Image (cartoon, coloured by chain):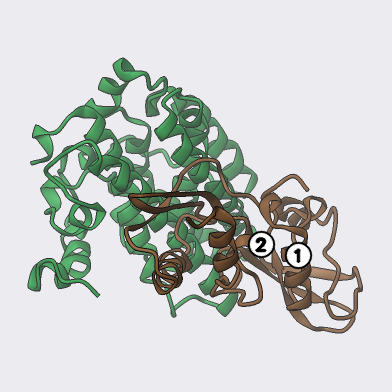
Chain colours: A green, B brown
Amino acid sequence: MLKDQSPYFRFLVQLGDDALILSQRTSEWCGHGPVLEQDIALTNITLDILGQARLWYQLAVDQTQDFKDEDQLAYTRDSREMTNILLVEQPNGHWGMTVMRQYLYDTFKKMYYARLEESGQASISEIAHKCRVETTYHHQWSSEWVRRLALGTDEGNDKMQHALNTLWRYHQEITQDSEADIAMLNEGITVTPSMIREDYQQEIKTYLESCGLSIPDIRNEITGGRKGIHTEHLGYILAEMQYMQRAYPNLEW
Amino acid sequence: MSTTDEILTLLKSVCDPEIPVLTIVDLGIIERITISENGLYIGILPTYNGCPAMDLIRMMIYEICYDAGYRNIKIEYLNSPHWTTDRISNEGMEAIKQYGIAAPSASTRIEQLISGQSSVSCPKCHSSHTRLISAFGSTACKALMQCEDCQEPFEYFKCNGLR
């Protein structure tokens, strides 16, 4: 069980979980993108993020006897054992919705990985560095698309505003500290998500307004992912992703 | 007793599956080779986190070393130092160009291509009148470009280094 594991392990797993579930979601676009180049772009981003999940999980399994490898972490945990934020499990919706989710995610992760890179823990900062470099590319892509869609036609602007309103209730969780985040402050990690909150809120506000969108006046926050309390969507994601290992445990290609 | 040079020679026959003219030695991913009574250890650097060629390359290295008579082969991906395009050898750069891919250069990083501050030369007609179609190409390491003069679409090996 996850709760029996060390904070260090849970910290690494939550980083991996965000990446794994988002990559599983965005992989749904593979072969369905609006144009070929953007289908390829999002599939590339998906692969990068899946690779990031793998690195965090690989470091995590070095800290415990209970999981032998990254696959076991990805394929054998039920939704109550998954600690990803709710934002990443939200349905893809239309292209603009996917782009908006990606923008909210990339903007935060870019800032967070940059701070994590300076955390002082060599094994963590090595992975954070790789993630930060890749996320910079992803952020360029997602922020460009937000701008293009929101400043294009009236219909595009409406759809992007609707996407922002829909995701807004879920996005605050990304800047909230989990128990594992706080425990890591004692283990030499010098940054927690809440330390970035102000900069993050400022950056997305400035950028989204420059794209002709208004920050929603929605105060209620829906959170719980870090504690394993998820929206109904995660179960469907896991059912599809884990099917093969559940049906044929330890199956290898 | 074999030397690391012999291993390097062996590895020079392994090519990046995505760019089959570029050897993994010229790509610069071979970081450490240790030979001892316990066996052979090779430490390699991943290029991009999710690059699917990584597992294949590991398998190819294993096979070629096994066929050459080595046993107890351990191949490991290292997270440090970070691979950048600076690690590609001059021969590697030449091979990339010969293959028809625009070679990485610090003067044409993706940011500069997006903002239009600089441009990549077309590998076919050498015109600098080219445009970025997408920062993400057929593989994680490449961007998609098109020449505005000869109209040829081509790939650009993205620079993440300093040169």
Residue B62: image location, x then y, percent: 40, 67
Earlier residue among tags 1 and 2: 2
Callout 1 and callout 2 share a chain: yes
Relative side of B161 to A54, left or right:
right
Q: Is residue A27 something that shows in the picture?
A: yes
Mark 2 is surrounded, within 10 Å at the Cα level, by few (under 14), some (14 to 19) or many (20 or more) other residues, namely many
Residue behind mark 2: B26
Residue A45: image location, x then y, percent: 49, 60
Mark 2 chain: B
Split into 4 quadrants, where in the image is the N terminus of chain A?
top left
Q: Is residue A244 above or below residue B86?
A: below
> Which amino acid does the dot numbered 2 rest on?
Asp
Residue drawn at point x = 44 percent, y = 42 percent: A216
Residue situated furthest top in the rendering = A186
Pointers 1 and 2 in contact (C-beta within 8 Å)? yes
Residue behind mark 1: B91
Q: Secondary structure at mark 1?
A: helix
Residue drawn at point x = 11 percent, y = 47 percent: A80
Residue A170, by quadrant, is top left
Mark 1 chain: B
Seen from the viewer's position, the closer of residues A193 and A206 is A193
> Which amino acid does the dot numbered 1 rest on?
Glu
Split into 4 quadrants, where in the image is the C terminus of chain A?
bottom left
Residue A55: image location, x then y, percent: 37, 48
Seen from the viewer's position, the closer of residues A9 and A132 is A9
Residue drawn at point x = 36 percent, y = 71 percent: A28
Q: Is residue A149 something that shows in the picture?
A: no
Q: Secondary structure at mark 2?
A: helix
Mark 1 is surrounded, within 10 Å at the Cα level, by few (under 14), some (14 to 19) or many (20 or more) other residues, namely few
Residue A30: image location, x then y, percent: 42, 75
Q: CA distance from mark 1 to mark 2?
A: 7 Å
- The image's mark for residue B23 is none
